[in-house]
Image (cartoon, helix red, strand yellow):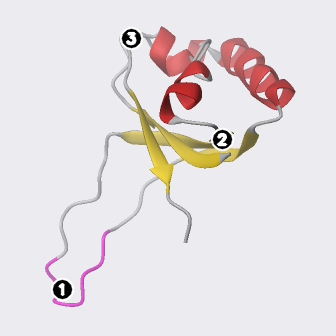
Amino acid sequence: MNDYLIFMHDDTETPMDVATSAWEDYFAMLRASGRFCGGSSIGSGICVHRSGQAKPVTSHLSGYLRVQAESIDDAKKLLIGNPVLNAGGTVEIRELPPD
């Protein structure tokens, strides 16, 4: 199994605060799959560069999930019921390569 991060973007067509039960259902499905490794919403922050000239923080990311899957296509299957995707928003899947 490979590890993947699923990033939720803050670009939904409908307000996400009305989807609390959708998140509960989605997390229940992920936990039942046995492939959910955690996640969190993402708050404000800063970028730091040793020159002092850091770029702006990536503001469109609103949360992430860490999952295990056989492939990126297998990880994509775990998006069924994802409230961000269902609300017309973007999700981004990134593989975490083994060290």
Q: Amino acid at mark 1?
A: Gly
Q: Which residue is mark 1?
A: 52
Foreground residue among 57 and 30: 30
Magenta segment includes 73:
no
Mark positioned earlier in the residue sequence (1 or 3): 1
Q: Residues within 10 Å of mark 1 (few under 14, many from 20)?
A: few
Answer with the quarter of the image where residue 35 lies. Answer: top right
Foreground residue among 3 and 8: 3
Q: Residue at x 60, y 13 (%)?
A: 80
Q: What mark, if any, has residue 67 been given in the picture?
A: 2
Foreground residue among 92 and 43: 92
Location of residue 5 in the rendering, given as x and y in whole percent from the top left corner: 53, 45
The chief SS type of the magenta part is loop
Mark positioned earlier in the residue sequence (2 or 3): 2
Magenta segment includes 52:
yes
Location of residue 11 in the rendering, given as x and y in whole percent from the top left corner: 33, 24
- 45 w.r.t. 27: above or below: below
Q: Residue at x 48, y 48 (%)?
A: 95
Q: Secondary structure at mark 2?
A: strand
Location of residue 89 in the rendering, given as x and y in whole percent from the top left corner: 38, 19
Q: Amino acid at mark 2?
A: Val
Q: Which residue is mark 3?
A: 88
Q: Residue at x 18, y 66 (%)?
A: 55
Tell me how far mark 1 sits from mark 2, CA to CA. Answer: 35 Å
Q: Amino acid at mark 3?
A: Gly
Tell me how far mark 1 sits from mark 3, CA to CA. Answer: 37 Å
Task: Point out the stretch of residues depicted in magenta.
Answer: 47-53
Q: Nearer the viewer, mark 1 or mark 2?
A: 2
